[in-house]
Image (cartoon, rainbow, N blue to C red):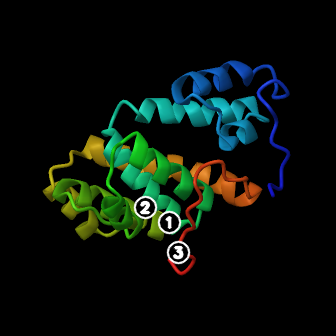
Amino acid sequence: MSRFTIPTRDSAPSASQPILDAVNAQLGVIPNLFRLVAQSPAALAGMTGLSGALGKTLDVKTRERIAIATAEVNGCDYCLSAHNYLGLNLAKISPEEIALNRKGASGDAKADAAVRFAAKVAQTRGKVGAEDLAAVRKAGYSDAQIIDVIATVGENFLTNLFNNVAQTEIDFPVIQADKAA
């Protein structure tokens, strides 16, 4: 059970309602995460603004792979469940690939470099080594794309924090993070 009351769309602050409507238009549903954060219109606007901006950078498969790896690192069952669902149904990532993503890897060589780097950023809170940057650059990522990978990790850290603190009720098929990770 969530530690916070999750408002309905109509009981959310009026400033949050248009953002929730946009989420509903995009996803066909308003997940509990968005309704939780809607209690602060500023936080909701910031979270969805960052997500919208980053949605124009890396491809959807790479973003979902990074989200899965980050959720696993942070032990966020809500985000792991959501991104497992989105990875399978939106990004069309195979279950085998998702299993690799949870381990901070990918079966695709270029994506593997990004996911490994993202997992390392998450695990070390950004204190990566020169060899980590060299590996992702060697795979063909520009400095701008590396910034996008880091920003995607940060975006997912934010949602992981919201859900881990709130213990948000999972409204996707439930996947549990490996608590030993």
Asked whether disc 3 touches disc 1, contact meaning CB atoms under 8 Å apart, the reply is yes
* Residue type highlighted by circle 2: Ala
x 27%, y 66%: residue = 132
Is 46 displayed left or right of 83 in the figure? right
Q: Position of residue 16 (x, y in %)?
A: 73, 25
Residue that label 3 marks: 178
11 lies above or below 108:
above
Residue 72 is tagged as 1
Question: Which picture quadrant has residue 95?
Answer: bottom left
Find numbered disc 1 in the image and state the secondary structure of the residue it sits on.
Answer: helix
Q: Position of residue 32 (x, y in %)?
A: 70, 42
Asked whether disc 2 touches disc 3, contact meaning CB atoms under 8 Å apart, the reply is no
x 25%, y 60%: residue = 112
Q: Residues within 10 Å of mark 3 (few under 14, many from 20)?
A: some
Residue 169 is tagged as none
Question: Which picture quadrant has residue 161?
Answer: bottom right
* Residue type highlighted by circle 3: Asp
x 22%, y 62%: residue = 107
- In this rendering, the label closer to the viewer, 2 or 3: 3
> Is residue 151 in sight in this rendering?
no
Cα separation, mark 2 vs mark 1, equals 5 Å
Find numbered disc 3 in the image and state the secondary structure of the residue it sits on.
Answer: loop
Is 138 displayed left or right of 111 in the figure? left
Q: Residues within 10 Å of mark 1 (few under 14, many from 20)?
A: many
Q: Position of residue 150 (x, y in %)?
A: 40, 51
Whichever of labels 3 and 1 marks the residue nearer the N terminus, that label is: 1
x 81%, y 28%: residue = 12
Q: Residues within 10 Å of mark 2 (few under 14, many from 20)?
A: many
Q: Quadrant of the N terminus?
A: bottom right
Residue that label 2 marks: 69
* Residue type highlighted by circle 1: Glu
Cα separation, mark 3 vs mark 1, equals 7 Å
